[in-house]
Structure formats: C-alpha cells, structure tokens
C-alpha cells in the first residue's frame, strides 16, 4: 500500500477558519490548516496559544463554534471523540493518558479497540467466539511492540516504567489502531537528547513504514526543523506563520512570540 | 507454593492468554473443582446447605457487583434491589407454570432491563452522585415491591417459591440444590475470568481508569457503562432467583433490603475491587465471620470464666467483625484478594525474595 492509496487525493486534514471560544476567551481564531498525505506537520507556539485546543477541536473534545474540520474530505466537525477515533484519528497526550492499572500489553491491545468487537456474548463464549480474534489482534500488537522496541516491558504495569517508555507506550497504543492521521501532543516533553532522537526516529519510521500522516506539537525547535515537512505557528489563538520550517522559524513575528521582541529586531 | 514458574514457555498467543497458563495452577483448579463436586459425599448436610451453598450463591452475586464496581468503576448501592427483581420475577414466573430453567433466565432479563433503564438515567451523573441515584433504585424497588400486592402478595407477605424442576426432574435434595448453586457460581466465575482477556473487559477498565483516554481510542464510555450495568444486573437477577430457589425457598421484601445492598458492597470491597478470588474470600468473610466471632466470644467467655451481659454478647461480635474489616483494609486496601496475591508472589520465589517475580 502506498501513501496515496489511503483515501484518494483529498488532504488528510483540513481546517477551515476554525474558531473556538471559552466564554470571553478566544482560544482559536480563524485557523486554516491543510495537511497533505504522508506529511509530518509541525504545530508550534508559546504556552496557551491554542495548540492543544486545536487538537481537542479536531478530536471532538471541544468542537469549534465556527468553521469546519474535514478528515480525508469528510466533514467531522462536532462528532463525538470516540466516533472520530473510529474514522482513523489517533492521538497522544501531553501529560500522558495511559491506563495505569493495566500492563503495557493490555494498554496497547486497547489501541486495537476499534478493530475488535467487544460484547458480552463473545466474552462468555470466549473459546468459540473470541479466541481467534484476540489472537489476530495480539499479533498486530506484537508487531507494534517490535516496531517501538517495547519487548522488555511488555508485561510490566504501565505505572512502574520510566516516563520515556510511557511516552513510547502511548505512541504504540496510538499506532496499534492503524490510524491514517496521528496527533502527537509534545511527545518529547521531559526527555533527554538521546530519548528525543529515538522518538524522532520512531515518528519518521511510523510515517514511512506505517503510512500515517502526523501532526506534531513540539516546543523543541530542533525537532520541528529537523523532521517536519511544513509547520504552523500560533500565538494567542491566531496564525502567525505557516510554511516550510526554515522560513517560519526565521519569521520575525514567530521569533518575537517565542523569545521576545528584542531579539527579533537584531 | 508447590510450583515454580521457571521452565514454562508459551509458543503461541492463545496459550499465553489461557485462563491458567501455569500447569500447576490448572491442577489446583481441577482438584478444587473435584472437591467441590464431591462435597455432598463428605460434608454433612447442615454445612452443605447452610454454609457452602449460600457462600457459592453470594460469591456469584458479589462477582456480578464486582463487574460494575471493580471493572467498570461505577458505584452501585442498589444491588440487592436488582437481585430482588430477579427473585420476584422467577417466583412469579414459576408460580405461573413456566419451567424453572426458563424462569431464572427471565429473572435475569427482567433485572437487566429494569437495571439498564434505570442506569440510562442514572449514568448522566458520575461518582458519588451516581451512588446516590443507585440508592434511589433500591428505595424505589423496596417501595414498589411492598406496596404492589400483585408483586409481594400483600402487605408483609411471604411468597412461597415452588420447588425447582430442571428438565422435568424435581430438584429437592440438598445435594441437588447445592449443584445448582455450584454450576451458577462456576459459570459466573468463568465469565469474569474471560473478562480479563477480552476486548470487553479491557474497554470496561479503560472507562474506569480515564474516560477521556478511553474516548480517544474509540471507546464509547456511556455505551460500555450501560453494558456493564445490564450484565451485572443480569447476573444479580439470576443470583437472586437462585438464592430464593435453593436457599430461602420463599421470598419477602426484607431479603433484598438496603442492608443487603451494603452487605454485597462489603463483600466486594473486603474481597478486593476487580479481584475474582477476592469475591470468594469477601463473600465468605461477610457471611461467616459474624457467626465465627459469636462462637469465638462464647467460647472465650466460658474458657476464661468472665461473664458477659446478654447485651454485650449480642454486640461484641459485631464490633470485632467491624474492627476486622477495618484492620484488613488498613493492611491492604485492595482487599483479601490482594493479600492472597501478595502471599502467593512471596512464596513463588521463596526463599529468593530478592528476585523479580
């Protein structure tokens, strides 16, 4: 399967003048974004600029009050989060959202939820109705475990593994769903240089080998410029720059938003 | 423990996910089942029908409550009401001439329907608010049962339950009734064991742990909460019907009052949330401990020659029993099931305690 095969020529994600307010606060104002198939698209901006709100608007947690969001050409504005997930959108969270009481394996198996048919009957008659399905999905999960090199912690409780691995488990859970569109909300927060490099390599490999299009939110500019094809910069809910990373990070408005006006004038 | 895990390798995924992946565990469960099957041969009927039988039925009930409380993480303070619905439904159905094996299924379905209609409204709220709305289910059912003569058979009435007939055979012997309870308990247990390794069980745990994270992977939390309520109500309804059919032989509203709901809740919490073996321990503890305490204190009073007023003698066992519950939960908040697991894990590697399990 090539990248083009997954849903024709329509952009994977398109936001058309998306607006989201929380009573008086305008968190997003007129955001236009178009992510092409097979891209790694960066989203940057200072804290509180609306990056996470935008992902929440896409995944259905905070539907936009104005504007439209299209996934593979299909309007998904205002759909419930669990339904958006079944359409092939997966995401990870900035502060991790793993199920702490479960093993790494069960967490990643949960990523296969949309491909399985959970029911009381299948549970009661496991030996006849569910074993084959569970085994097939387990094989798919083992594939992801191999891909992200998580073999060593497969049976550990998620609670007990270090944060760098937890981030990787969350990525594994997202990839297990075989999404066409993957949103990574600061996957490298709190990581050291080596872990960051590992993660960057995993993201590139996921794009190349597992055919996902990636929206990457990150504060590490070296990562953004290093692996993103295009990017968008936000400030106070407004778009302040978009295009190829090298151009955007040189844009005086972006520099001003990130490190202050004094540097921009030099 | 009698065995080591060393040297046991699984070469395919279904063996890895077997209910008891370790051969020694399979032997243990097999011998326990044999012991349970042979119980009428070596146990006197008093113990069989007044201790073992209610323990098995209550364990099935506790497992049903554990499904909603331990797996899906939703409070339920009206579980006895659900059991009561099942009990009354089965008694009325079999009095109307419906065969008992169909009557108990009807009992389960009635309980599941009423339980999930109620849950449909109650699940709009979460946590403690949900607990209070389920308490409302209890009071509504108490009131309805005692105020509608068509259900209760009149004020303060006791409805006689017809004798059980299974596939045409009358089941009236103590052994027969015991086997009915045993089969139901084994069925519920195997369902709960399967829940640990299927997509349904994982989805329920996802809903319990973090509902927003569940939504992100495509789990519709409301739907799965509803499924949990319906399934646990079904188990509760059938358990109520079996409790009346095999143990009480008659049904009155007090058998399923709010105290009983609290008792069921205590079984699950003392046994351990989400623990299957814990539900066995919890049911045994809650059912047997008051009696054990009673005889212990009477024995101690005669042995050490102190005399106790009749008042003290009535309340002291209750106080000790309460203290024991608090004590166990202080040692291990996850209940008796977790204490069992800790001991097991310790013995598995004994005497090399420094090794990883």
Image: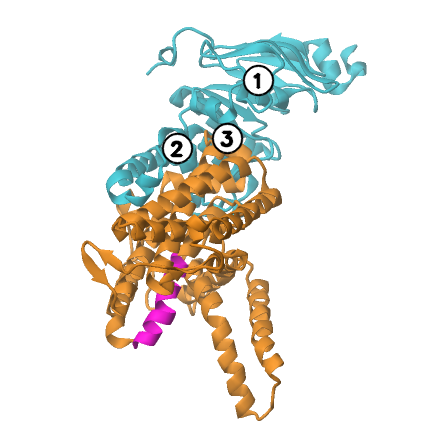
Q: In the rendered view, does B109 fall on the left or right side of A17? A: left
Q: Mark 3 points at which residue?
A: B215
Q: What element carries label 3?
A: helix
Which residue, as the protein is rendered here, is positioned at the far top?
A9
**Residue nearest the viewer, comparing A157 with B40:** B40
In the image, the segment drawn in magenta is B44-60
Q: Are marks 1 and 2 in contact (CB under 8 Å)?
A: no
Give the prevailing secondary structure in the magenta stretch: helix
How far apart are the alpha carbons under marks 1 and 3? 24 Å
Let me know if residue A244 appears in the view: no
- Name of the residue lying farthest toward the right: A262
What number is the disc on residue A144?
A: 2
Question: Closer to the observer: label 3 or label 2?
Answer: 3
| Secondary structure under the numbered disc 2 in the rendered image | helix
Chain A tint as drawn: cyan
Distance Cα–Cα, label 1 vs label 2 = 24 Å
Q: In the rendered image, which residue does mark 1 sit on?
A: A42
Compute the Cα span from label 3 to label 2. Answer: 21 Å
Q: Chain B is drawn in which colour?
A: orange
Residue A266 in the image: x percent, y percent?
A: 78, 11
A92 vs A252, left or right, is left
Q: Mark 1 lies on which chain?
A: A
Check disc 2: other Cα within 10 Å, few if <14, some if 14-19, many if 20+.
many
Where in the figure is residue B228, as x and y percent of width and height?
Answer: 44, 42
In this rendering, the label closer to the viewer, 1 or 3: 3
Please name the residue shown 26% across and 50% down the image: B97
């Amino acid at each position: 399967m090539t990248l083009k095969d997954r849903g024709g020529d329509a952009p994977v994600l398109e936001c058309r003048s998306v607006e989201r307010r929380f009573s008086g606060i305008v968190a997003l104002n007129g955001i236009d974004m178009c992510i092409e198939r097979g891209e790694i698209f960066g989203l940057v901006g200072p804290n509180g600029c609306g990056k996470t709100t935008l992902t929440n608007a896409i995944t259905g947690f905070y539907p936009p009050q104005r504007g439209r969001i299209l996934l593979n050409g299909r309007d998904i504005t205002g759909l419930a989060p669990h339904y958006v997930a079944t359409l092939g959108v997966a995401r990870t969270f900035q502060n991790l959202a793993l199920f702490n009481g479960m093993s790494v394996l069960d967490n990643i198996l949960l990523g296969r939820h949309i491909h399985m048919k959970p029911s009381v009957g299948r549970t009661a008659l496991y030996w006849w109705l569910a074993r084959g399905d569970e085994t097939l999905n387990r094989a798919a999960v083992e594939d992801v475990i191999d891909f992200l090199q998580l073999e060593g912690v497969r049976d550990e409780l998620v609670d007990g593994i270090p944060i760098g691995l937890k981030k990787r488990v969350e990525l594994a859970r997202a990839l297990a769903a075989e999404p066409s569109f993957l949103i990574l909300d600061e996957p490298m927060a709190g990581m050291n240089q080596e872990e960051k490099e590992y993660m960057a390599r995993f993201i590139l490999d996921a794009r190349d080998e597992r055919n996902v299009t990636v929206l990457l939110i990150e504060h590490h500019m070296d990562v953004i410029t290093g692996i993103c094809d295009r990017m968008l910069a936000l400030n106070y809910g407004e778009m302040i720059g978009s295009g190829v990373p090298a151009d955007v990070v040189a844009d005086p408005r972006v520099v001003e938003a990130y490190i202050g006006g004094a540097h921009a004038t030099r | 423990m009698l065995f080591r895990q060393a040297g046991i390798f699984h070469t395919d995924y279904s063996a890895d996910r077997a209910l008891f992946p370790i051969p020694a565990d399979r032997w243990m469960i097999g011998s326990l089942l044999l012991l349970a099957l042979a119980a009428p041969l070596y146990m006197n009927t008093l113990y069989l029908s007044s201790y073992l039988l209610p323990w098995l039925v209550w364990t099935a009930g506790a497992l049903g409550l554990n499904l909603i409380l331990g797996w899906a993480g939703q409070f339920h303070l009206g579980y006895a009401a659900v059991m009561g619905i099942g009990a009354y439904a089965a008694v009325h159905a079999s009095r109307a001439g419906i065969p008992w094996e169909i009557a108990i299924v009807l009992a389960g379905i009635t309980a599941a329907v009423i339980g999930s209609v109620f849950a449909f409204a109650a699940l709009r709220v979460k946590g403690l608010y949900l607990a209070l709305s389920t308490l409302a289910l209890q009071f509504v059912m108490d009131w309805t049962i005692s105020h509608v003569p068509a259900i209760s058979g009149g004020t303060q009435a006791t409805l006689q339950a017809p004798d059980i007939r299974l596939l045409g055979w009358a089941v009236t012997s103590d052994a027969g009734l015991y086997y009915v309870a045993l089969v139901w308990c084994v069925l519920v247990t195997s369902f709960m064991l399967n829940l640990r390794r299927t997509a349904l069980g994982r989805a329920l745990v996802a809903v319990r742990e973090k509902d927003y994270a569940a939504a992100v992977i495509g789990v519709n939390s409301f739907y799965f909460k509803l499924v949990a309520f319906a399934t646990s109500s079904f188990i509760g309804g059938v358990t109520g019907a079996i409790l009346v059919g095999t143990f009480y032989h008659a049904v009155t509203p007090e058998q399923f009052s709010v105290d009983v709901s609290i008792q069921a809740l205590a079984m699950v919490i003392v046994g351990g949330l989400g623990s299957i073996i814990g539900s066995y321990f919890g049911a045994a503890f809650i059912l047997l401990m008051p009696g054990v305490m009673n005889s212990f204190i009477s024995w101690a009073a005669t042995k050490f020659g102190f005399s106790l007023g009749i008042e003290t003698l009535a309340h002291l066992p209750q106080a000790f029993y309460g203290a024991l519950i608090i004590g166990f939960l202080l040692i291990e908040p996850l209940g008796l099931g977790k204490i069992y697991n800790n001991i097991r894990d310790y013995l598995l590697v004994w005497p090399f305690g420094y090794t990883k399990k």
